[in-house]
Image (cartoon, rainbow, N blue to C red):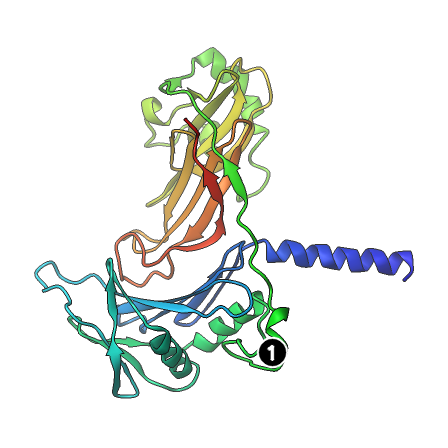
Amino acid sequence: MNRKLMFFALATLSLSALASHSGVTFEHKDWEVACDNTLTCRVAGYAKEDDPSGSVLLTRTAGPGTVPTGEVTLADSAEDSAPVQKLTLWIDGKPAGDLVAADDNWRLSAGQTSALLNAVKGSGKVEFKGGATPFLLSGEGAYAALLKADDVQGRIGTPGALTKKGNKPESSVAKAVPAPVIQAANTLSGEPRLLTAPEIDALKTRLLSTVNHNDDDTCDSLYSPAENSDPETDGLTLTPLDDSHALLSALCWRAAYNEGYGYWVIDNQLKGTPVLVTISGSDYDKGEITNVQKGRGIGDCMSQESWVWDGQSFRKSYDGGTGMCRYIHAGGTWDLPTLVTDVKPVSG
């Protein structure tokens, strides 16, 4: 192989490896899939949009020989509604067994999960009875979502594929990728303090140099305070992290039902270059920055990110959402991560 071809092959391999370590999301009609960086895929299906009665979640870890597990959640009902005592799966008008109650949801057996998959891939009717109203699962978009999960996990053409089965050996299926490990570090317990006017003047140019590079990375409130901002809560603050690092925070933007705070790491003397973590943070507490945003005003769908302090920087520890905006639960329907990590707690 000549050097140019070798470089191309290595570059292609590197891109493939990078793709397998990043999250993938896909949505089609009434179904969606989110595969995280470990290659675990979660496929969610819903009732038709005008019938917010429930949702199904199918979860499959990567690797040869794994099978999907299934669970069901019913939409929040009126406060005076009696709790659901029994939920039964019906396929093509015939009962296929009762589900097992698990916390606030219902768990499908392996056989029920398989039967449900076979039905939604074709023209079968899948229904759950026992709630205040029956939950009729839509099949529109199911095949496309399942095909995407198969593709991400390298299952297409294997016996274990959910869609396009074949004779490729199961050993060819992509193996699970270990979640990155983050060792959380101790932080100081000091309260945030508002910076003085001279401190802000000395910092503003350096802070602005870290943002406003494109439309997705802006902090307009650093230029001028928002109309409804409160200097006591939205102004530039400093929170000690450890003996040599501090965390700066200020309101960056405010919209109809969301707002975002900027967070920067800097040395305790405020002399160095601030390092931007996010311009869309929601809170900081004990070494963790979180960002929680509503998909719409009623809050039935959310996105979330988090970053953990490891003693040198804030490392992203989670990225994900709660699924489609379908009026099922306040705060969102499922946990659909695209990035997961193994955060080791502070020792001692």
Which one is in front, 348 or 62? 348
**Left or right of 63, for residue 116:** left
Residue 136 in percent (x, y) is at 28, 77
Which residue in the structure is indicated by mark 1? 157
Question: In terms of image quadrants, where is residue 239?
Answer: top left
Quarter of the figure that contains the C terminus? top left
Image height of 327 relative to 297, above or below? below
Residue 319 in percent (x, y) is at 46, 48
Q: Residue at x 28, y 72 (%)?
A: 50
Quarter of the figure that contains the N terminus? bottom right
Which one is in front, 38 or 7? 38
Image height of 121 relative to 260, above or below? below
The amino acid pointed to by label 1 is Gly
Question: In terms of image quadrants, where is residue 325?
Answer: bottom left
Q: Residue at x 60, y 19 (%)?
A: 272
Label 1 sits on a secondary structure element that is loop
Visible residue check, residue 26 = yes
**Left or right of 171, for residue 228:** left
Visible residue check, residue 253 = no
**Left or right of 120, for residue 313:** right
Residue 141 in percent (x, y) is at 44, 75
Which one is in front, 67 or 319? 67
Image height of 197 relative to 251, above or below? above
Q: Residue at x 41, y 82 (%)?
A: 118
Spot the residue most to the right: 2
Image height of 336 relative to 273, above or below? below
Spot the residue most to the left: 80
Callout 1 crowding tier (Cα within 10 Å): few <14, some 14–19, many ≥20: many
Q: Residue at x 31, y 63 (%)?
A: 326
